[in-house]
Amino acid sequence: MQTTQIIWKNQSIDIEYQWLNETQKEAPILLFLHEGLGSIALWRDFPKTLCETLGYRGLVYSRPGYGWSTPRPTKEYWQIDFMHQQAIDVLPIFLESLHVQSPVWILGHSDGGSIALLAAVNKPFLVKGIIVLAPHIFVENLTISSIKEAKEQYLKGDLKQKLARYHQDVDSAFWGWNDIWLDSEFKNWDITNEISSIQCPVLAIQGFDDPYGTMVQIDGIKERVPNTTLLKIPDCGHSPHRDQPIIVVDGIKEFLVSQVAAI
């Protein structure tokens, strides 16, 4: 892994990142945005497999507070609008630090999918198209119930021990996610109107058995963003790329091939 340094909120932040297929300088770039408790390592082999299948370059990074990127300095560092901040502030600064100038394809999972949508809204010049796995566009009661259960598992079960292998500061990673989602003000978080301005192509993927969200999330994207393709997967939970990797890789390949052909 490598690190790059950015300045965010007047603080120096180290960002852990990894290039895949870096020697293919002319290939399109596919940027990976992890889930709310994710990191580079928690993607496992999926980015490598997908990029090799597509012939794309891959760029994977751990957002501030996760993996071996700089942990949160204080609890207040994460606010209700943290996904907007990641899309509007952190993502462009990170790409600039690596001298990435051309528009990129973005693949985001869960919170990362929401951040990808917000990047397409607010920084359209950076985004060629997006692929979102189990994204959120508003807060469902089902999501809150599952996040409360995760809190119990972290405090009383073995979730903290499992996550500690993947984060420099596991409490920073967990509470930075859990505290915000369970904040009473966050229940009103809703980007359904914002995403109506998205012009780039979107592939939205959702599992029927996801404990963190239902089909209303990606159906809502389709209703508001005309250039959206949906992929709904049976026998699939919150991590389609782990639960049904062949279907996901094939679906992404078909989507990207169709978009290139349409240019």
Image (cartoon, rainbow, N blue to C red):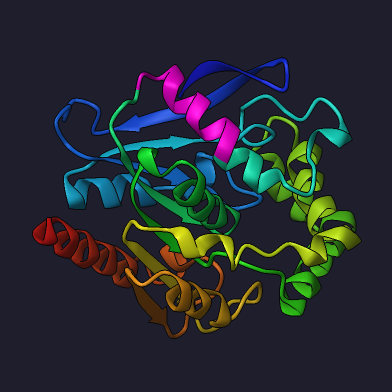
Residue drawn at 24 percent across, 67 percent down? 250
- Image coordinates of residue 98 in percent, x first then y, are 40, 20
Q: How far across and how far down the image is residue 212, in percent?
A: 65, 72
Query: For the point 78% across and 39% down, which residue is it?
Result: 78
Identity of the residue drawn at 49% across and 46% down: 119
In the image, what residue occupies the spot 27% across and 69% down?
Answer: 251
Q: Quadrant of the C terminus?
A: bottom left
Residue reaching furthest to the left: 261
Q: Where is the N terminus found, in terms of image quarters?
A: top left
Is 87 left, or right, of 204 in this rendering? Answer: right
Does residue 127 lie above or below 140 as drawn? above
Q: Main secondary structure of the magenta part?
A: helix
- The vertical placement of 210 against 77, above or below, is below
Q: Position of residue 33 (x, y in %)?
A: 49, 46
Most foreground residue, 197 or 237: 197
Camera-nearest residue between 33 and 243: 33
From the top left corner, tell me how far across and down residue 43 is, in percent. 47, 48
Residue 91 within the segment the image draws in magenta: yes
Asked which quadrant contains residue 158, the reply is bottom right
Which range of residues does the magenta coloring cover?
A: 88-99
Identify which residue, 229 or 162, lies in the foreground.
229
